[in-house]
Image (cartoon, rainbow, N blue to C red):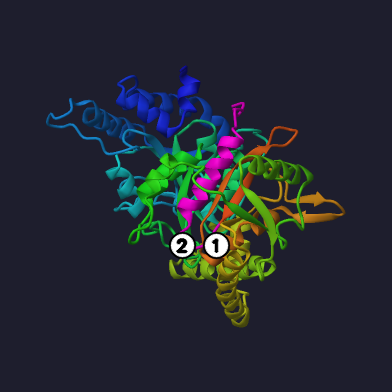
């Protein structure tokens, strides 16, 4: 492998090279840091690079992995041992600046790690730095007014999606092997789709959000982004809070993916009302690939899908504004917010109590209706395009589909709100490219705690539809 091959390899491949002593954690960390120095000025994927910490963690991992078996000091912590990763900058890191992409927290240094950081440290991961993001995770573009916009590695004039835009851009461009982001209305899956990587929003509460700055606690989730489904499974296995005899996500990548036939539902509602022609073409191609792989599909009805966008918005707007008021940020420091985030916080003040309560009732009903629809239709999961459109230009706020002009933010959110509202898992996997070379994503969504199932299906699709292109950065 040359340096580019190594930078874009999978966690699984790098781990094998470690254990054959053909590559060391220090060597791969030095490669990542050099690549960040070269490429990050173009992408702006990192706010903070923790070079000294990363090299110290890499040396420790190397001493543990490379000590002779059976000798004092040898320790293999598992598949993430010595692997360089990044964290979205709303995740607390003890002694390391954590800005949440905001001016208000530009000098904030937490005293404790978030729970997921402790899990990564115990697994032996190497922290390269904190990824740029949409301010306070409250947006889908990652056009950050305080630290500069994150740029899409496939086209620097376009957005990577958000709010975990820096995480997705860094993974896609080979500036880390995986990243942990957060998802309240699609903030992992949107950038995964637009940057051509895989990303998982887990079941609500199954990856700890302790020590992560909240946006909307009723909807917030933390989850992984990586270049392959197997790597997403590896990261999920380390972070996932298992209950009882549930399958171990860390072993999903080793499971036989042809163990059974799967049937997937294509909802009649919501997902195909407003869709770019290129995204529709990629989705139709994905259906043909799934069919050739032995997976069947059928149309199903999922009641209340059309109401999830408004319900999710009313919950998120209200909870976000309440949190910022409780922290004393808003309206006391209103001038220190970017215009878009400030306007959304102002919107939260205008949500009527009756609309918020109606949104909670729709949420309750939708959870029931979704699981009932999956059971009655006898499908394992539902599939649809991860986003209705491909990546927009950095300055683009609307897009024309057919005869109608649509707000870009709403189009990016609408396919992703349902999983957050229902608290169920959903994975986005690369689904091909537009004629201009922009990635698209396929989303697979299932019932509560169906992560292992979704990852198995996603891996079948990944194997039948391999992605060999590399971003031009």
Element under disc 1: helix
Look at 33% across and 33% down and name the residue there: 54
In the rendering, which numbered label is found on residue 204? 2
Image coords of residue 278 (percent x, y): 76, 42
Near mark 2 (Cα within 10 A), the count class, few <14, some 14-19 or many ≥20, is many
Question: Looking at this rendering, what residue extends furthest in the left direction?
Answer: 72
The answer to whether residue 214 is seen in the rendering is yes
Q: Between 376 and 366, which is closer to the camera in this rendering?
A: 376
Near mark 1 (Cα within 10 A), the count class, few <14, some 14-19 or many ≥20, is many
When asked about the image quadrant of residue 125, the answer is top left
Separation (CA) of disc 2 from disc 1? 8 Å
Span colored in magenta = 446-473
Image coords of residue 211 (percent x, y): 36, 57
Image coords of residue 212 (percent x, y): 41, 56
Element under disc 2: loop
Magenta stretch holds residue 115? no
Residues at discs 2 and 1 in contact (Cβ within 8 Å): yes
The answer to whether residue 162 is seen in the rendering is no
Query: Which image quarter is the C terminus in?
Result: top right
Image coords of residue 281 (percent x, y): 75, 42
Q: Is residue 395 left or right of residue 219?
A: right
Question: Looking at this rendering, what residue extends furthest in the right direction?
Answer: 403
Q: Is residue 303 left or right of residue 105?
A: right
How many labels sit on residues?
2
Q: Is residue 86 left or right of residue 283?
A: left
Look at 48% across and 32% down and name the residue there: 175
Q: Between 48 and 5, which is closer to the camera in this rendering?
A: 5
Question: Looking at this rendering, what residue extends furthest in the top direction?
Answer: 2
Q: Between 296 and 426, which is closer to the camera in this rendering?
A: 296
In the rendering, which numbered label is found on residue 420? 1
In the rendering, which numbered label is found on residue 131? none
The numbered mark, 2 or 1, whose residue comes first in the sequence reads 2
């Amino acid at each position: 492998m040359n340096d580019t091959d190594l930078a874009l390899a999978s966690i699984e491949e790098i781990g094998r090279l470690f254990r054959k002593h053909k590559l060391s954690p220090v060597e791969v960390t030095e490669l990542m840091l050099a690549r960040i120095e070269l490429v990050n000025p173009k992408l702006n994927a990192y706010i903070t690079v923790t070079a000294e910490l990363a090299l110290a963690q890499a040396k420790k991992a190397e001493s543990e992995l490379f000590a002779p078996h059976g000798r004092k000091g040898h320790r293999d912590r598992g598949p993430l041992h010595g692997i360089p990763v990044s964290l979205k900058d709303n995740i607390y890191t003890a002694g390391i600046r954590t800005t949440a992409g905001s001016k208000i927290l530009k000098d904030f240094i937490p005293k404790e790690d978030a729970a997921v950081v402790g899990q990564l440290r115990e697994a032996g991961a190497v922290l390269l730095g904190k990824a740029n993001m949409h301010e306070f995770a409250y947006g889908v573009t990652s056009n950050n007014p305080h630290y500069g916009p994150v740029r899409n590695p496939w086209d620097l004039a376009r957005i990577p999606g958000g709010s975990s835009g820096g995480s997705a851009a860094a993974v896609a461009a080979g500036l880390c092997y995986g990243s942990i982001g957060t998802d309240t209305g699609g903030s992992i899956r949107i950038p995964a789709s637009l940057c051509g990587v895989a990303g998982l929003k887990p079941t609500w509460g199954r990856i700890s959000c302790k020590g992560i700055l909240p946006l909307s606690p009723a909807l917030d989730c933390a989850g992984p982004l990586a270049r392959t489904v197997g790597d997403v499974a590896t990261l999920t296995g380390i972070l996932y809070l298992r209950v009882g005899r549930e399958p171990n996500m860390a072993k999903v990548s080793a499971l036989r993916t042809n163990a059974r036939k799967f049937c997937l539902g294509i909802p009649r509602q919501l997902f195909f009302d407003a869709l770019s022609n290129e995204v529709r073409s990629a989705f139709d191609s994905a259906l043909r690939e799934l069919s050739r792989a032995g997976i069947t599909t059928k149309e199903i009805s999922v009641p209340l899908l059309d109401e999830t966008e408004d319900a999710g918005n009313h919950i998120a707007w209200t909870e976000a504004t309440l949190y910022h008021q409780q922290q004393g940020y808003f309206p006391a420091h209103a001038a220190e917010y970017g215009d878009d985030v400030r306007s959304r916080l102002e919107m939260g003040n205008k949500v009527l109590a009756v609309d918020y309560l109606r949104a909670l009732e729709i949420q309750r009903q939708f959870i029931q209706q979704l699981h009932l629809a999956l059971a009655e239709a006898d499908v394992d999961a539902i599939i649809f395009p991860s986003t209705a459109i491909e990546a927009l230009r950095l300055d683009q706020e609307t897009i024309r589909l057919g005869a109608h002009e649509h707000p870009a933010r709403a189009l990016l959110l609408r396919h992703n709100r349902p999983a957050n509202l229902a608290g169920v898992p959903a994975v986005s996997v690369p689904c091909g490219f537009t004629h201009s070379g922009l990635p698209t994503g396929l989303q697979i969504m299932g019932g509560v705690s169906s992560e292992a199932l979704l990852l198995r299906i996603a891996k079948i699709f990944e194997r039948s539809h391999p992605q060999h292109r590399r971003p031009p950065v």
